[in-house]
Amino acid sequence: MYKIYCTDRLVLKQLDSNDAELVLDYYIRNKVFLTRWEAEREGDFYTLKMQKLLLDQDIESYKRGSSIKFWIFKKEDEEKVIGCISFQNILRSIMQSCILGYKLDVSETGKGYLGEALKKAIGVMFSEYDLHRIEAPVMPINTSSINVLKRLGFVNEGITNKMMKVNGAWKDHIRWSLLNPDHE
Ligand SMILES: CC(C)(COP(=O)(O)OP(=O)(O)OC[C@H]1O[C@@H](n2cnc3c(N)ncnc32)[C@H](O)[C@@H]1OP(=O)(O)O)[C@@H](O)C(=O)NCCC(=O)NCCS
């Protein structure tokens, strides 16, 4: 069964290939906005076929326990995706950690939606999934993203050189982390 959570203004839910049109619409609307911050996209990324495939892969990864992705909706409009939050590379055993990623719709920035959604989702990952550490790699120039993390109490653990290929080039990232407050 897929997970759904609510905050004051938002609904966070898992989607599968049946919802590919909503996700494709989000990516098309935000193509220019996201270019600077994400991996280069192949031409077929902006097709229903590819989005169905990617959503199915997300669900398979969720079933394996490797990741979980929540798509964000405003309560008054559950037909329009306004962003997403992903917890990837979930490691168990002595790590209990994951990598956090997120993005909003450009027209919904500056309203506190991402912070509100993240607060809920992080609480879920610590309490229901018993994770110990959430890591968020962010490029030093991405001040909006850094501000979101600082407000949530993430700590700067330093730079990792050429950590990720963003918009076609290997970029340094700051590693921000948050530890589960219930763990010693
Ligand atoms: C990173 C990103 C999600 C941040 O978006 P954001 O809108 O700044 O974040 P939030 O939704 O939490 O909103 C916070 C802003 O809303 C303001 N705000 C307005 N109303 C608010 C409310 N009711 N509650 C809280 N904050 C509110 C806050 O003051 C804050 O503005 P400030 O940073 O100028 O002080 C967005 O820029 C994005 O999608 N970027 C592209 C993808 C990306 O970079 N992803 C991260 C890669 S590491």
Image: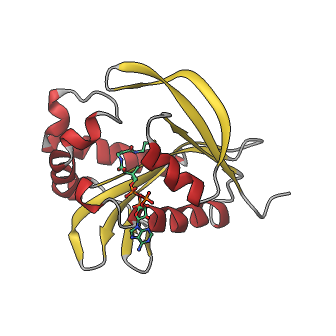
Q: Nearer the viewer, residue 30 or 17?
A: 30
Residue 101 visible in the current orientation: no
Residue 161 placement, left or right of 15: right
In the picture shown, does residue 43 fall above or below 83? above
Q: Nearer the viewer, residue 47 or 162?
A: 162
Identify the residue at horizontal 46%, vertical 44% (top origin): 143
Can you give x and y, in whole percent of width and height, for residue 34 in the image? 28, 40
Query: Which quadrant of the figure has residue 93?
Result: top right
Can you give x and y, in whole percent of width and height, for residue 54 in the image? 30, 42
Identify the residue at horizontal 35%, vertical 36% (top origin): 37
Query: Which quadrant of the figure has residue 124?
Result: bottom right
Residue 76 visible in the current orientation: yes
Can you give x and y, in whole percent of width and height, for residue 111 in the image? 35, 67
Identify the residue at horizontal 59%, vertical 53% (top origin): 150
Quarter that holds the N terminus: bottom left
Residue 57 placement, left or right of 61: left
> In the image, ligand 1 is in what quadrant?
bottom left
For the rendered model, the colour scheme is secondary structure
Query: Which quadrant of the figure has residue 3?
Result: bottom left
Residue 53 placement, left or right of 121: left
Identify the residue at horizontal 21%, vertical 53% (top origin): 26
Quarter that holds the C terminus: bottom right
The residue positioned farthest toward the right in the image shown: 184
Can you give x and y, in whole percent of width and height, for residue 103 in the image? 36, 50
How many numbered tags mark residues here? 0
Q: Nearer the viewer, residue 38 or 65?
A: 38
In the picture shown, does residue 9 fall above or below 64? below
